[in-house]
Image (spheres, rainbow, N blue to C red):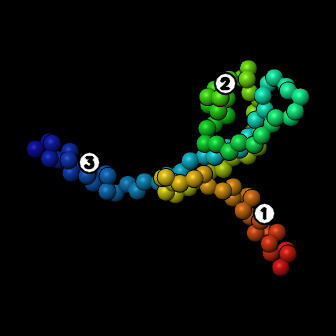
């Protein structure tokens, strides 16, 4: 009897709670700690937070990163690329309106 009641409660909980998905995107300027003759900084867009990114790619002794900006991708994000920066999209739209 208790299993039957628990099953009904579990089923009701799964049906009544909508699921929302989102993830945060970070954009960095990455440069090596050891300076070379040519500038070797580059821009990276990643879903890894700053601490995880540095740890995954060699640690604080190997990399120097500067966070440029961050934004959130909302909605169903399964099997999709990283969403575009919403500020860049707004800037492009405003520039297009000014040219017309």
Please tell me how crowded label 1 is: few (under 14), some (14-19), or many (20+) other residues with Cα within 10 Å: few
The residue that appears at 82% across and 34% down in the rendered structure is 40
Identify the residue at the far right of this view.
37
Residue at which label 2 appears: 58
The answer to whether 95 is drawn above or below residue 69 in the figure is below
Residue located beneath label 3 in the image: 10
The answer to whether residue 72 is visible is: yes
Choose the circle earlier in sequence order: 2 or 1: 2
Count of all numbered marks drawn on residues in the image: 3
Q: Nearer the viewer, mark 2 or mark 3?
A: 2
Residue 57 image point, x, y percent: 65, 29
Residue 62 vertical position relative to residue 94 in the rendered view, above or below: above
* The label number, if any, that marks residue 45 in the structure image: none
Element type at marker 3?
helix
**Against 50, is 18 above or below?**
below
Name the one closer to the observer, 81 or 98.
81
The image quarter in which residue 50 lies: top right
Residue position for label 1: 91
At horizontal 73% and vertical 23% (from top left) the residue drawn is: 62
- Asked if 87 appears above or below 54 in the picture, the reply is below
Seen from the viewer's position, the closer of residues 26 and 15 is: 26
């Amino acid at each position: 009897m208790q299993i039957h009641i628990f099953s009904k409660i579990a089923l009701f909980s799964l049906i009544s709670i909508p699921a929302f998905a989102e993830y945060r995107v970070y954009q960095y300027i990455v440069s090596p700690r050891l300076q070379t003759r040519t500038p070797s900084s580059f821009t990276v867009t990643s879903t890894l937070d700053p601490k995880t990114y540095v740890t995954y790619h060699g640690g604080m002794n190997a990399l120097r990163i500067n966070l440029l900006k961050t934004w959130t991708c909302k909605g169903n994000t399964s099997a999709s690329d990283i969403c575009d920066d919403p500020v860049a999209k707004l800037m492009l739209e405003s520039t297009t309106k000014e040219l017309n």
